């Protein structure tokens, strides 16, 4: 059974930092591109960052230079280090993986973790 479990969200003041984690189980996450998305109230879900199976990374323009995506293959876990947080970063953050698994092509999501940036 594949699961993705996010953690690390919370309330932080503008300019602060948080590190989100996405613990994967049921598959070897290092073999897949993995993504962080976020969804703010009243807005569509948007892609925040991607890390490829070979370690390449890409970021949305809104977070470039502030967020860093990484992965620890030994722990089967992906991270999102978020620095210099702004109020507009307030959203539910989700981790995602899609790809060809041994049991077919699938698209998996975590349950999300709330990030609130407010003074």
Image (tube, rainbow, N blue to C red):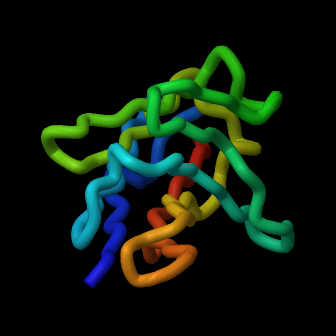
User: In x, y percent, where is residue 114?
Assistant: 50, 62
Which residue is most to the top? 65
Q: Quadrant of the N terminus?
A: bottom left
User: In x, y percent, where is residue 103?
Assistant: 40, 83
User: In x, y percent, where is residue 101?
Assistant: 43, 71
Q: Quadrant of residue 14?
A: top right
Name the side, left or right, on which 43 lies relative to 67.
right
Name the side, left or right, on which 80 lies relative to 106.
left
Question: Going 36% across and 61% down the picture, which residue do you hit?
Answer: 6
Question: Going 71% across and 22% down the picture, which residue do you hit?
Answer: 64
Q: Quadrant of the C terminus?
A: top right
- Vertical placement of residue 83 versus 51, above or below: above
- The residue lying toward the viewer, choosing from 60 and 18, is 60
- The residue lying toward the viewer, choosing from 52 and 88, is 52
- The residue lying toward the viewer, choosing from 57 and 93, is 57
Which residue is most to the left? 74
Q: Say how many tags the image has.
A: 0
Question: Going 84% across and 73% down the picture, which residue do you hit?
Answer: 42
- The residue lying toward the viewer, choosing from 85 and 54, is 54
Name the side, left or right, on which 99 lies relative to 75.
right
Quick check: can you spot residue 16? no
User: In x, y percent, where is residue 97?
Assistant: 51, 61
Quick check: can you spot residue 83? yes
Question: Going 41% across and 31% down the picture, which residue do you hit?
Answer: 70
């Amino acid at each position: 059974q594949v699961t993705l479990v996010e953690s690390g969200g919370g309330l932080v003041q503008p300019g602060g930092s948080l590190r989100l984690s996405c613990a994967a189980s049921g598959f070897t996450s290092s073999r897949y591109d993995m993504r962080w998305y976020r969804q703010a109230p009243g807005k569509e879900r948007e892609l925040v960052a991607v890390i490829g199976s070979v370690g390449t990374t890409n970021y949305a323009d809104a977070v470039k230079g502030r967020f860093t995506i990484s992965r620890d293959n030994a722990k089967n876990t992906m991270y999102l280090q978020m620095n210099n947080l702004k109020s507009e970063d307030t959203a539910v953050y989700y981790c995602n993986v899609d790809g060809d698994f041994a049991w077919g092509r699938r698209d998996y999501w975590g349950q999300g973790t709330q990030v609130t940036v407010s003074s």
